[in-house]
Amino acid sequence: MNPEEVKTVIFGILQRIAPESDPTTLGPDENIRKALDIDSFDALNFFIRIDEALGVTVPESDYGKLNTLSEMLGYFSSRTS
């Protein structure tokens, strides 16, 4: 998947997890959890849904590396191409 396709998947999942927010307004280096007020339970749900949608299992040791849209796009795009 290219980064735009991955971004569409990420935004779709974020909109389900934080329906009152608009992920499309996120800046590339903005901390997503803080910007969308996502707690640890919702963050875990996000990674589970990413695994279902992209087939990318994120090890718990990598959770802290995926805070911004830029970080997520790089991480998931490289694992889905």
Image (tube, rainbow, N blue to C red):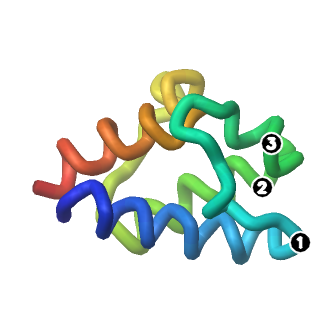
Q: How crowded is mark 3: few (under 14 residues within 10 Å), some or many (20 or more)?
A: some
Mark number displayed over residue 60: none
Which quadrant would the C terminus be assigned to in this image? bottom left
CA–CA distance between discs 1 and 3? 12 Å
Query: Residue 61: x and y, percent?
Result: 49, 23
Q: Which amino acid does label 1 sit on?
A: Glu
Q: Which amino acid does label 2 sit on?
A: Asp
Mark 2 against mark 3, which lies toward the viewer?
3
Label 1 crowd bin: few (<14), some (14–19), many (20+), radius 10 Å: few
Number of numbered discs on residues: 3
- Lower sequence index among marks 1 and 3: 1
> Closer to the camera, 8 or 13?
8
Which quadrant of the figure has residue 80?
A: bottom left
Q: Name the residue under label 2.
A: 42
Residue carrying label 1 = 20
Task: Label 1, secondary structure: give it.
Answer: loop
Residue 35 shows which numbered tag? 3
Q: Is residue 23 above or below residue 69?
A: below
| Residue pictured at 67% horizontal, 56% vertical | 25
Q: How far apart are marks 2 and 3 (CA)?
A: 13 Å
x, y percentage for residue 66?
Answer: 52, 32
Disc 2, disc 3: CB below 8 Å? no
Q: Residue at x 59, y 70 (%)?
A: 13
Residue 47 location in percent, x, y?
55, 53
- Residue at 56% across / 66% down in the picture? 11
Question: Distance of mark 2 from mark 1, alpha carbons?
Answer: 14 Å
Instruction: Indicate left or right for 27 with 38 as reference.
Output: left
**Dot 2 lies on which element?**
helix
Q: In which quarter of the image is the N terminus?
A: bottom left
